[in-house]
Structure formats: C-alpha cells, structure tokens
Image (spheres, coloured by chain):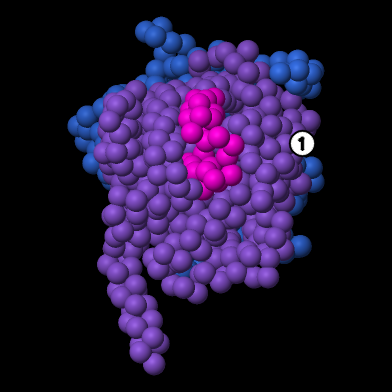
Amino acid sequence: MMMVPLLSGCSPKEAAPAQFRVGQFLFSTQNATITLYDGKQEKTSLKLKYGKLSNYTSLEAKIYFIKVWADGKLLLEKKIGMGRDGRYTLVLTGIPEKNQPVNRKSTMQKLHTIVEGSEGITANDYLPQLIVQNDFYIAEKNTGKIRVMHLMPGAVPFSLDFMNNKGKKEVRSTAYPKSSETIEVDTGTYNVHVHFDASLQTVALQKIEIKESVLHSLYVIPAPERYLTDPILVVGSSDKEKSL
Amino acid sequence: MAKKLHPISVWALAAGGMVGGGIYTVLGVVIAVSAQWAWLAFLIIGILAVTAAYSYVFLSNKFDDSGGVFAFLKEVNDKAMAGNLAWLLILGYVFTISVYAYAFGHYVSFAFHGSAFVIRILAVGIIAALILLNLAGVGKMTKVEIGIVCANLAVLLALGIYGLTKWDAVQLVAGIEPRPVWSALVGGGAIFMGYEGFQLLSYEYDRIKNPAKNFMPVMISAVVFVVVLYIIVALGATFIGGAVSLVDFKAIALSITAQKAFGQTGVIIMTVAAGFATAAAINSTLFSTANLTKNIAKANELPKWFKHTNGKDIPDRAIIVLGSLAGIMAIAGSLTALVEAASLIFVITFGTVNWLCFRESEKLKWIPAIGIVIAVITACTLLFRVAISKPVAFGGLLFIVLLVVLGRPLLLQHNKKMKTGTDDN
C-alpha cells in the first residue's frame, strides 16, 4: 500500500474537461443538428452540412443526453458519458428513411447491443446511427497515426494506399461502419489512393500530410448525389481544432 | 518426498492462479458489455467461483483425491462424463494458456513499442521457453511463483486503491452508452476464465499440509479476496483510464491505466507485473495440465501416447502438444473469442463440480445449489452471446463438443481393440 502515495508523485497532469467533435455523414441529408443535454438543460448545439467534420468543443465531463435532427426531423437519441480528459468524435452515419421513427434499429443491431454492448456495432440495415469514436491514442516520436472508418453504406471494404517517393503503405478498411485499427505511418506528404477490394481502380485520390505524434482519422463517405460509385475522403487531425 | 505446502503458500498459489493473467485481459471485454456494471459482473461470477471453491474442497476432502473434477466423477462412477469433461477441461486449459501468452505478448511489446510481429514472437517465445523449462524438470517453482504472486497482487491492489481515490462515476461510461443492470450477467459470463486458476490447487491436494483442516478456509478466503480485488481493480482502473479506452485497448488495458495514472513509471511497473504474472500463470497451467493429461491417459481416457515421460519423469509429449496448440491459438485467435471459449468450458466444469457437491453433501446444500443456478444462467447467456456475436465460433464450439461426446468413445473403443489385439498376439 506504500506504493500508492509513492506512485501518486508520478501522476502526469491534472484532469481536463472532455472534448468532442461531430462528423455529419448522414447520406442524403443537407444539414444535421446535434444537441447535448445535461438532464433537460441544453448545453451545446452544432449544425453541420453533409460531409463536414466539426472543430473540437470542450465541455464539462458528464453523462449527456444527445439528440440528432436531420433536415429538421428528430432521428436519433442516445446517452453518452464524456469522461474527464476524454476526446471523442461523434460520427453520424446511415441513410435516413422517410417517416422514420426515432432510433429505429434492425433486429440484428438490437441483439448485438444486448450481447456486446459498446462493441456491438453493425450496419443496422444502413439506418441512421450515432457511433462514438475514442480519439485517445499513444503518441509516438517520428511517426503519425492513422485510422480509416468505412462509412459508405452498402459498399464492400476498400483499401487506402499511402504513396510517396519512399514507397507505399496499404491500410485495409473493415466492413461498414467500423474503424480500422490505428496504425503508425512515417511523417511526410502522401497521395492517398482509395480502391475497393479486388479492384485496382482508384476511386478517390487525396493528398494528406502525416504529422509527428498526431492521430489522423480518415472517413470514407459517399459523395453527395453519387452514392457508391464515387467516395470522398474527410480527414480529421487530432492536433487541430478544425477539420482539414 | 516433496515438502508439504503451508496454508499461506496454498493461499498465495490459489489467489495467484486466478489473478495471474485473468484481470490483465478480461477487463476491457467486460466493460464493453456491462459498462458501469462491470464490477457487478465480477461479483456475480465471483459468487459462482466461491461456491465452486467450496465444492472443490468438499469433494477433495471427501474423496481424499488430488485429481480434480476428473477424479470426482470417477469416484461417483460416471466414467463417460469424467472422460468427456476431462477432454473439454484440457481444451479449456489450452485456451487459457493461449490467453496468458496473448497478454504477455501485448503487455511486453507495448512497453517497447513493438509491432504486431513482435507481439506474436513474444507470445510464441514465452510458451516455447516454458515448454523447455518444464521439459528440463524445473517447471514447478513454487517459491518463485509465490514471490511473483505477492508482487503482482500488491501492484494490482495499489493501482485499484489509487483509482478509487479518483472516484468519478462518469468515467465508468466515458465514451460509451450506460448499460442496464442485467448486462452484468452477459458480461460476467464472457470473462469467467478470470476466476478459473484456483482449481489447479485441487491437483496439488496431496501436497497440502493437513488439508482436511486447512484447505477449506484457505481456498474460500483466497477466492473471496480475488473477488474483492477484481471489483476494486474494475472500478479503480476505469476511474483512471475511462471506459472506452479500456475497451479499445483491451489487450493492454492495465498498462493504459497505469500510463494515464503514473506516466512511463506506471507502464514499466505494470509491464513487469503483467509479464511475470502471465509467465507464471502459463507455467503453472502448462505443468498441471500436462500432468492431468498423463493421468487421464493412464486411466485410458486418452491415447496412451500421452503417458510417456522423459528421463526426469516429465510428461514430455503432453507438454509439447498442449504448449504448441496454445501457441498457435495465441497468434491466430482473437482475445475475446479465446476468453469466451475458455470461460464457457470453465462455467460448465464449475457447474458440474457444484452439482457433484450438491449430490454428495448432506448439509449446506444451498451453497452448491446457488452455484448450479448461476452456472446454468451464465452458460446460457454466454452461449447466446457467442451465437449472436460469433456464429462461426459458435459452430466451432458445437463441433468440438460433438467431437468429444461422439468421437471420444470411438477413439477409446479403437484403442481397446488395438490393446486386445496386442494381448492376443
């Protein structure tokens, strides 16, 4: 027990409030509004166009009740804990249906939630859902971190080739709507080629700068109006308060 | 003759058998399912562990036998059940060793920023090293094991208590959705293997000093201590690390916690504790399982090939086969799937031991009765979970059970025919 006070001296820093940002990837919507409530009291609200990733917003560490409206219609409600020092991305994905009830879930989604809890993430029949991404990562010197989230409802998994004059690094996505493992990449500027599995054809291309000790989150979403044929990349960086 | 084990040594080995590896890997798995009720999950299945400990000791004392559940079932003349369960139990131990190796690889690699390849090398390397150590006849190092256990318990207790001083209920659901209270049953079932280690002591029954007097209080107090420790660590670590980070980094959950609490110093201490604890757990499980395999082969419930011992009276073939299987699973399997598979086998085993105790005892029948009820509920919820979340693994498990129940009698029949043929010649 003598170790407790001894180790307390090694405690790195004081606790800070929580931070969150929002990715609005609800296909076929123009705008979405996300509002956080502490009990019945509204704490903060964000309105975002399709394909946008917001800045990080700081708020007191608490359990919040979240409501999501798309084009004025209430789609989702969820309770989420925002822990001290925590950083989260609230990802809105799926395709809203006409006259859809709030929080509509497929039977498989309900079953997976029962048995797997927070890890029970399924395609939910491509219905709208709010997925919380943990933005905590272990920073490493000389390298940056990347993770890829497949947010194209109905599309097969794909690969991202990070190419520069030093070579190529491939990152494979998981199935919709999951995130790949976070991996290390050397710092530098890369051309990122997106291609569907079993195809060499590049369906999206973007230049990305990988910075040291920074987490880069890549969201592959359907381009507006074009759906599965033409994905676009949205990139979020942990060192900036704004999206890239 | 080997020196008898003092009650304090028995206590340390029982507690260490559970903690050595269990809590390092199961915490993230249970938090994902049960969130703020993870501590309750540890309590519910902890009650099953306590009742099973009572039943193990009761039956060991009654039959004065050190063979564990296999011996108990033979004593009540249920040889078919004894054989079936023995096969499943050996498989459960192989899963358990693979989980410990998986944890060893991840915890040690994390401290040195190792890649996925390094993790695999470490996992296989530790098993290979302990296979060689056992083959050389130095596998059972009781004093070293007790030293490791004490240091390990101190580190975990210190981390847990430090975490409790940072009490913050929001951290229990940080980054995730709060879960209903019944989720504790589902979460508990998935991680039951965290409590299995104490029953390795039932194989050492004949080495315990005055077991009729000492075994029951020592075993029960060790299991109760571990239940309390797991609850303290489940709460304390989550207060420090936050729920979602322990879920996302479940393979190294306690290193993440230690880093958030104490920086690099914490990571070093946790790596040393986890490294030694998991290595000791692999060693003792491999040693005991190989001896169990040899004894089962002697009872003609496994091919006689496994009876073979080397010059140092070590069941070499059993050690090599079991260790190699565990090594393959450690690099090929997913943590959650391995933990679930091991948990299911141990829930069935502990339920059976409780049932035997209920049948054989004349008083305090309510203790095994509680264990039977919790084991049945836990097994059902776990099967439901695996069927939904991993249908392929569920099919694999059913296949293994069918193989054991149907294939074992065929194999034994074949062995008997071969033996008769040899005798005739």
Q: Amino acid at mark 1?
A: Ile
Kindly tell me whether residue B9 is visible in this rendering: yes
Front residue (pair A208, B314): B314
Q: Of residues A125 and B332, which is closer to you in this image?
A: B332
Q: Does residue B52 sit above or below B336 in this rendering?
A: above
> In this rendering, is residue B23 above or below B177?
below
Is B329 situated above or below B13?
A: below
- Residue B208 located within the stretch drawn in magenta: yes
Q: Colour of chain B?
A: purple
Q: Is residue B111 magenta?
A: no
Front one among B80 and A197: B80
Majority SS type along the magenta span: helix
Residue depicted at 30% across the width and 34% down the height:
B361
- Element type at marker 1? helix
Mark 1 lies on residue: B268
Residue at point 61%, 49% (across, down): B284
The local crowd at label 1, few if under 14, some if 14 to 19, many if 20 or more residues have their Cα within 10 Å, is many
Look at the image and give the residue range highlighted in magenta: B196-225
User: Which residue is at the far bottom?
Assistant: B425
Chain A visual colour: blue
User: Residue A71 lies in what quarter of the image?
Assistant: top left
The residue at 34%/23% (across/down) is B181
Q: Residue at x 77, y 36 (%)?
A: B268
Q: Where's residue B316, x and y in %?
A: 61, 68
Q: Is residue B281 left or right of residue B294?
A: right
Residue A26 x %, y %:
38, 37
